[in-house]
């Protein structure tokens, strides 16, 4: 597995590179956003670890360019920013996971393994529920015959619902399976994203599919 680390703090980059290489990953590094983006566009990587605050081109600009070019390489964002608003901005721009500094290498490694594993599993037959369809290979989504444009995290959340229909999914389960987070403070992010998803999936449909189970979580089912 080949990983690109884009980090301008040389000690942090060296720490990550050394640790990942000890786990048998092949690692390349870049110290600014422009160099990192050039590498990401020219070579194939299984994962990109990307710092938010970078010289020449910041992480958000890097990520937006990557996604605008339809590149689906998983991205783990590193940053000292840790508010709900900051996390939402990062995820909406196209990052697949988010790790705040300072961090323990064991946590970084767990996130890396989870993202790579999820990317490898992101293949398979089309999933259907009621008049909702998703393609796990292309990440395309349709309600009836209308295609719906979702962000990476909205898609990940919907796929989790689609693989577990008619089951109550707690916020803890969603955090653990979709974001690999298990702490309570992440609850607000889940509620925000379920709301985003509802607006796109259910707003113009006569039959609502995503329902709140008060005090517990959410369920994908037909009707009330």
Image (cartoon, rainbow, N blue to C red):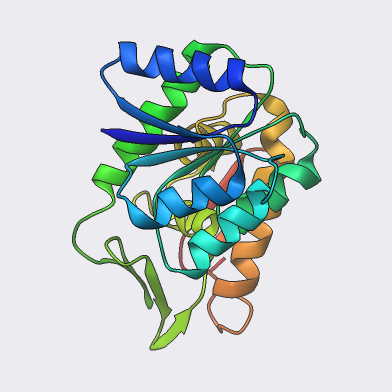
Front one among 202 and 212: 202
50 vs 165: above or below: above
Residue 26 visible in the picture: yes
Image coords of residue 215 (percent x, y): 69, 39
**Residue 51 placed where, x, y %?**
62, 36
**How far across and down, in percent of the image, does residue 172 sit?**
57, 31
Q: Is residue 41 left or right of residue 62?
A: left
Quadrant of the image occupied by residue 113: top left
Residue at left offset 37%, top offset 49%: 164
Picture quarter with the N terminus: top left
What residue occupies the far left of the structure in this picture? 125
Name the residue nearer the viewer: 155 or 211. 155
Query: How many numbered callouts?
Result: 0
Point out residue 154 in the picture as x, y percentages from the top left corner: 54, 58
Q: Residue at the spot x=39%, y=51% of the render?
A: 73
Toward which corner of the image does residue 189 lie, by quadrant? Answer: top right
223, above or below 185, in the image = below
Work out which quarter of the rendered image holds the C terminus and state it.
Answer: bottom right
The foreground one among 7 and 179 is 7
Q: What residue is rendered at 42% in x and 48% in y? A: 39
Rendered view: 9 above or below 214? above
Query: Quick one: 117 or 8, which is closer to the camera?
Result: 8
In the image as oriented, which residue stretches furthest toward the bottom?
145
């Amino acid at each position: 597995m080949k990983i690109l680390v884009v980090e301008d703090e040389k000690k942090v980059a060296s720490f990550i590179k050394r640790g990942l290489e000890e786990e048998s990953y092949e690692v390349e590094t870049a110290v600014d956003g422009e160099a990192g983006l050039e590498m990401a566009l020219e070579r194939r990587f299984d994962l990109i670890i990307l710092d938010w605050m970078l010289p020449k081109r910041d992480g958000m600009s890097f990520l937006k360019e990557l996604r605008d070019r339809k590149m689906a390489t998983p991205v783990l964002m590193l940053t000292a920013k840790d508010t709900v608003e900051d996390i939402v901005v990062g995820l909406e721009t196209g990052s697949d996971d988010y790790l705040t500094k300072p961090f323990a290498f064991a946590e970084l490694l767990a996130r890396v393994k989870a993202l790579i594993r999820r990317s490898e599993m992101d293949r398979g037959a089309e999933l259907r529920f009621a008049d909702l369809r998703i393609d796990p290979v292309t990440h395309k989504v349709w309600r009836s015959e209308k295609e719906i444009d979702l962000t990476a995290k909205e898609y990940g959340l919907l796929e989790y619902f689609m693989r577990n229909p008619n089951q109550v999914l707690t916020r803890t389960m969603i955090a653990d399976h979709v974001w690999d987070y298990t702490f309570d403070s992440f609850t607000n992010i889940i509620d925000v994203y379920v709301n985003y998803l509802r607006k796109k999936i259910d707003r113009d449909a006569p039959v609502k599919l995503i329902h709140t189970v008060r005090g517990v979580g959410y369920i994908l089912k037909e009707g009330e």
